[in-house]
Amino acid sequence: RGSPPMTTNMDIGGEGLRLVQTMATRDALRRGCCSDAVIDHETVPFRVLVDVARALRGDGAGGCGPYLQDLVRGGGLALRAPTRVKRDPTLERRCVALRDKQEQRKYESMTKDVTNESKTGQGIRMSDVTRELGFGAHVLTLMAACFAGGVVAGRSFAPDNTTTQVVLGTVGMFIAMMVEALLFMLRDART
């Protein structure tokens, strides 16, 4: 009993592997007295080339015919492309539904932090609103204080130039806003 046949996605055919014809294979087939149909065909069965090479070399008796590797060089295998098996429509519909569910789960996991619902599912709680409003008031107060500090610093550099005072106050306000934005991002990344 032999081993079970190997399954492949390639149909080789009853005659076995076929090779693309080259000048060397055509010449050897002519010398081996093959029919014109075999010589003129685009491909030739590998078994035929083996038999022709053995016959031309005298079957190991020291003949001067070509070696098999010289015959097949440059030709290559001629394989038919595998045919795609049609899927069952029920299976295809099920696969589409599963892909849709997977995409929906993926989307929901990406957007779950974006919703405004609290952890209890009751919507926005007043304590959350108070905390956010308190943070906004803190940022505005800090920006106003830094603007006033910049104006005072501008008076020490240029007591008569109002433009310099306003520019330094605006720079102080901008720096305060950037620091608060950075702190907000750090705090939000932790929670």
Image (cartoon, grey):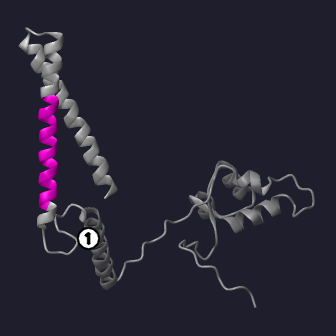
- Find residue 132 and report its image quarter: bottom left
Indicate the position of residue 28 as horizontal and vertical percent values.
73, 55
Q: For the view shown, which residue lies furthest in the bottom direction?
A: 1
Total numbered circles: 1
Main SS of the magenta segment? helix
Q: Which quadrant holds the C terminus?
A: bottom left
Asked if residue 108 lies left or right of residue 143, the reply is right
Circle 1 SS class = helix
Give yes or no for residue 191 being in the magenta stretch.
no
Give yes or no for residue 140 being in the magenta stretch.
yes
Q: Is 128 rendered above or below residue 6?
A: above
**What residue lies at 23% left-to-right and 42% top-to-bottom?**
181
Q: Nearer the viewer, residue 37 or 91?
A: 91
- Find residue 25 and report its image quarter: bottom right
**What residue lies at 25% left-to-right and 66% top-to-bottom?**
112
Q: Which quadrant holds the N terminus?
A: bottom right
Q: Is 12 rendered above or below residue 39?
A: below
Query: In this figure, which residue is indicated by the disc labeled 1?
Result: 104
Q: Nearer the viewer, residue 98 or 138?
A: 138
Indicate the position of residue 119 as horizontal and vertical percent values.
23, 71
Indicate the position of residue 136 as horizontal and vertical percent values.
13, 47
Task: Please state the extent of the stretch shown in magenta in the rendering.
Answer: 129-147
**What residue lies at 53% left-to-right and 73% top-to-bottom?**
9
Amino acid marked by disc 1:
Gln
Q: Nearer the viewer, residue 49 or 190?
A: 190
Asked if residue 44 lies left or right of residue 173, the reply is right
Answer few, some or many: residues within 10 Å of disc 1's Cα (few below 14, many 20 plus, some between 14 and 19).
few
